[in-house]
Amino acid sequence: MNITGKTILVTGANRGIGRALVDEALKRGARRVYAGTRQPLTHPDARVTPLTLDVTNAAQIQAAVEKVASLDILINNAGVALYDDLSDRAVIEQHLAVNLFGPYSVTQALLPLLTRSRGAVVNVLSVAALAPFAPIAAYSISKAAALSLTQSLRVLLAARGVSVHAVLPGPVDTDMSRGIDIPKSSAESVAQGILDGVERGDEEIFPDPMSGSIAESWRNGAAKTLERGNAALLEAQATRSP
Ligand SMILES: NC(=O)c1ccc[n+]([C@@H]2O[C@H](COP(=O)([O-])OP(=O)(O)OC[C@H]3O[C@@H](n4cnc5c(N)ncnc54)[C@H](OP(=O)(O)O)[C@@H]3O)[C@@H](O)[C@H]2O)c1
């Protein structure tokens, strides 16, 4: 999958990793970038088409989809992370609404266009999907659930020719991680790492040095082995059925 000449939609495109993804896609010669944002956005590059898109708002998703003529790559980047201790169910629900049902709903709505282009879905998750970080426990739950969503969609959409990728970044220097004093990668370098991974066709993309340090063990580990085994089982069943 080469970014040059492609049409891409990025959610949460106004700041942080999303903004960097828009700029990196433009640098790599994207034909059009739909920038989904909650607040109005202006961008100096004429290839950018702003879309009003709160990923928890069904009417906004529908209205946005109607403005998209064709699409090669959907990047579900919008996300929320709040400190919590799991004492308030509403906080868990808030994270699930944005980080799980957001990508779910946007992907479902854009599936006809992605099927037509035999395109790609790229879900920006977190290493917290693999091991929870307790100060952001509800966030970790939502990212783990979104990883499972990504893995199932990968199998379910394969027959339509749509590839589904999980991005598992470590800490990135954006508003989201402002309060945590640990080494962080820049949003620009992470955006490059994400699009490099999409261009290579990596199922899981580890876009920064911290996450990159576990990439090999993930690819050779028990969870990936089970995922491949489940996919092979389904393939064998499909071959046997008349
Ligand atoms: N920063 C990190 O350390 C880190 C690490 C791993 C993964 N990630 C993931 O990377 C993605 C981007 O995060 P970031 O670091 O760039 O965070 P950020 O700077 O806080 O930006 C979050 C983006 O998501 C948007 N957003 C939040 N709720 C939304 C909703 N309901 N509908 C549409 N957009 C919404 C925000 O829009 P508004 O401006 O309107 O609020 C903003 O554009 C997230 O999925 C995050 O979980 C981040």
Image: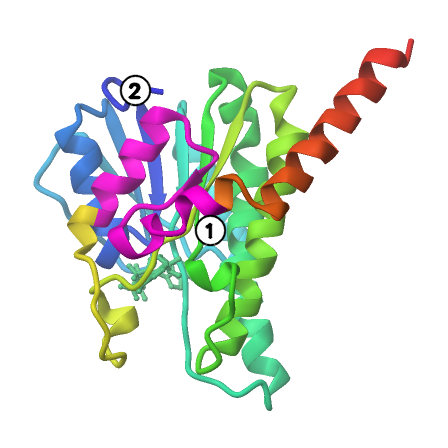
Magenta-colored span: 190-217
Q: Residue at x 71, y 33 (%)?
A: 229
> Which residue is farthest top?
242
When asked about the image quadrant of residue 112, the answer is top right
Q: Which residue is mark 2?
A: 2
Check disc 1 and give the amino acid type. Gln
Prevalent SS, magenta region:
helix
Residue 66 lies, with reference to residue 175, above or below; the image says above
Q: Position of residue 203 (x, y in %)?
A: 48, 34
Query: Which quadrant would the C terminus be assigned to in this image?
Result: top right
Ligand 1 falls in which quarter?
bottom left
Mark 1 vs mark 2: which is more N-terminal?
Answer: 2
Q: Which residue is mark 1?
A: 60
Q: Position of residue 206 (x, y in %)?
A: 36, 46
Q: Residue at x 60, y 73 (%)?
A: 93
Determine if the magenta segment contains residue 200: yes
The alpha-carbon separation of the residues under discs 1 and 2 comes to 29 Å
Q: Position of residue 185 (x, y in %)?
A: 20, 58
Query: Which of 172/51 is in front?
Result: 172
Left or right side of 43 for 121? right
When asked about the image quadrant of residue 51, the answer is top left
Q: Residue at x 68, y 41 (%)?
A: 226
The residue carrying mark 1 has its beta carbon less than 8 Å from ligand 1: no
Q: Residue at x 72, y 25 (%)?
A: 232
